[in-house]
Amino acid sequence: MKRAGIVRINDIVDYIAAYHPDADFDLIRKAYIFSAQVHHGQTRLSGEPYLNHPLSVSMILAEMNLDEYSVSTGLLHDSVEDTHATIEELKEEFGEEIAFLVDGVTKISKLTHKSRIDRQAETFRKMLLAMSKDIRVILIKLADRLHNMRTLEFVSQKKQAAISRETLDIYVPLASRLGIFFIKKELEDLSLRYLNKKVYKEIEEELVVTSEQREKYVKEVIEIIDEKLNLFGIKAIIIGRPKHIYSIYNKMREQNLDFNQIYDITAFRIIVDERKECYEVLGILHSIWKPVPGRFKDYISLPKRNMYQSLHSIVIGPYGQRIEIQIRTKEMDAVAKHGIAAHWKYKEGRKIEQKDDHRFEWLQQIIESQKDMKDYNELLETFRLDLFPNEVYVFTPAGEVIELPKDSTPIDFAYRIHTDVGHKCVGAKVNGNMVSLRYQLKSGDVIEIMTLSNHSPSRDWLNLVKTIRARTKIKQWFKQIDREKNILLGRELCDKGFRKYNLNFTKLIKKSQFHKELKKEGIKSVDDLLEAIGRGTKSYRHILNRFLPKDVQEETTPEDKNKKVIKKQLKKDPSGIKIDGLDDILVRLARCCNPIPGDKIKGYITRGRGVTVHTVNCSFVKDINFSRSIDAKWDDHSKYLAVVTIEVVCEDKKGILANITTAISASEVNILGANVKTSPGSKAVNLFKLEISSLEQLEHIKKEVKKVKGVISVSRYRT
Ligand code: MN
């Protein structure tokens, strides 16, 4: 049956006609013809025509009693990945729904579960579900995997093991969760066959050897049950079958038993019409055979998450042998075999009762909307999967799966990998393409983070990140950096302030008297004091005053004090630079880059010489230890005049120099000096030293000078 020979399209059509006589058979035949055309000439590793694979997959989908769209997708599922066919073409030929399903299967087929970490499997399964968007995509993928497992003998041993492992890790639990036990069992057996051939063969042979004896026993048990149930007027179907090889293997392994030591190899299933009869049957069986304590389970009152319902019990049967019994109704039995797929069959009336489980609400919806589902968009909608609406699943370049909240960005991902990767993150590639750090990750993305060793987080990141981890780490970093910075600043202010009164702060803090004074102020350490001063919440005067004679102590309030300092500062230092809200600090402009008002600037906290201000693109700034760098801004009312040299390259012609100076003077700028640097060939290179009040003014002069006839280029000259 399942494995015997080649599946033909008529077999599939006949099979569907039996459970769904109104199906669109033209659609299925059309899909078959299309598939035959695009796969024409392709062969599988076994040497048979490739078409056999999609045909077999479709047959499995028909065995799951799925709709014609799923079955047609089975025929087409490899056409986009392995042939020249495109999604657009499928949309045109077969409509949106099939194109959507094929696209879904193609997308998840591209995901490979590379990681060997066990805990990854669950996340990977969630990712498959999240990416599938429609439950049928997963069902088709399961059918595809089942047929590939059935034909696994043709691939290399290494691949056999890898695929079997993946099947056990990913697809078996999926089939189990969706309750499709006939696929789950076959996948388990096939996986075991390739992962542990010896054990598989041994169990298989044992089953054959013991089959005659077992069948006799099964017959006997069935007769006893049948007779008893007749007595009570209960009609039932009784089946006794050996468990599948994998479950026997599991039992042997878990309990460390030999095959011969396992008595409950046969499972008996009793199928009745009514739910209440299930309990009656149980009562009858427990009255003739002693139940094994602790082995009774009522999955009818408490269905499994995958909606499986049944009564389970183990009893001591004839000859003292343990036998496992499952009792359920026909509907429950259909669910047990087909799981979620069983619900496609149910038309009206019989609704399956189940417990509310928010993760599986969609299942409930499927069942409920079965009643009058004529509109086919509505139908499509009910199959949509949204199991994990608040999560995305992405890969590291090594194939590890990472679960993150929806709308997470590469920064969240970076912090998830490692705190340091987060701090040093400068960019990200998603599926090989550069993206902005604002990019919102999508399930299935492969993320690669680019880092720079001296890079540091930015405060805007706090607006971009979604994870608590990233937010906390960024905040911690800034807290740490701010503290270091404030300590340095506080130190700088104290050094300077104390020096004014001929006190050596460095020596002072080593004395116990200093620490006593701190204690009086309620300050725990020198660093705490410096941090508070650096942050501006405390003035160093508080401490300083304790070391000054009474008559020198200033009685001014901190506010007055600050104003005075600002006035002094403006007189002394006309640069008008604001250092991160601090006024009482010495500011110097760096000579190396010679900033002009308007340039983007950055402060550098020196040791003992206040703050030096550089332009942000000065090479010095790139090497600054982050804790020593500090934000600096020009005061809008700065009266500072910077000395700037511009380099003018021009033709070596008479009179040109005069024209250039005229142009500069017209802009009301002082020329402090001019000289010719070099004159290679017919060009002259002139340097002009100017007094510039702003970047704007400099740009204006450059523009004006460029207008002079014979001028080739004008640029800011840096030594
Ligand atoms: Mn396939």
Image (spheres, helix red, strand yellow):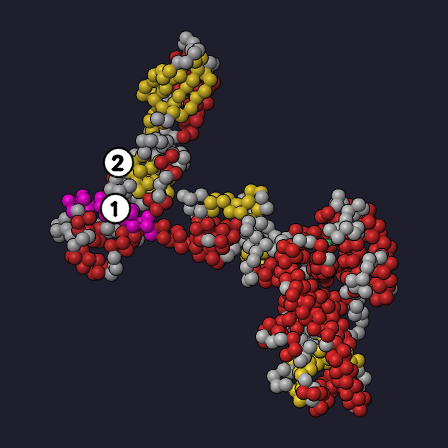
Residue that badge 1 annotates: 493
> Magenta part of the protein: which range?
483-503
- Is any atom of residue 232 visible in this view? yes
Which residue is found at the position 87% from the left and 62% from the top?
A: 14
Residue 473, given in percent of the width and then of the height, sits at 43, 55
Amino acid beneath label 1? Leu
Residue 273, given in percent of the width and then of the height, sits at 79, 81
Q: Nearer the viewer, residue 521 or 181?
A: 181
Ligand 1 within 8 Å, label 2 CB: no
Compared with 284, 695 (above or below) is above
Which residue is found at the position 62% from the left and 60% from the top?
A: 165
Name which of mark 2 and mark 1 comes first in the sequence: 1
Q: On residue 571, which mark appears?
A: 2
Q: Quadrant of ligand 1?
A: bottom right
Residue 708 is one of the magenta-drawn residues: no
Q: Quadrant of the C terminus?
A: top left
Q: Secondary structure at mark 2?
A: helix
Q: Quadrant of residue 605?
A: top left
Ligand 1 within 8 Å, label 1 CB: no
Q: Residue furthest top?
A: 654
10 Å crowding of disc 1: few (<14), some (14-19), many (20+): many
Q: Nearer the viewer, residue 87 or 651?
A: 87
Q: Single out the mark in the foreground, 2 or 1.
A: 1
Residue 558, given in percent of the width and then of the height, sits at 26, 50
Asked if the residue at tag 1 contacts the one at tag 2, i.e. Cβ–Cβ closer than 8 Å, the answer is no
Residue 501 is one of the magenta-drawn residues: yes
Amino acid beneath label 2? Lys
Q: Nearer the viewer, residue 315 or 62?
A: 315
Which residue is found at the position 55% from the left and 45% from the top?
A: 429
Residue 232, given in percent of the width and then of the height, sits at 79, 90
Q: Quadrant of residue 652?
A: top left
Q: Secondary structure at mark 1?
A: helix
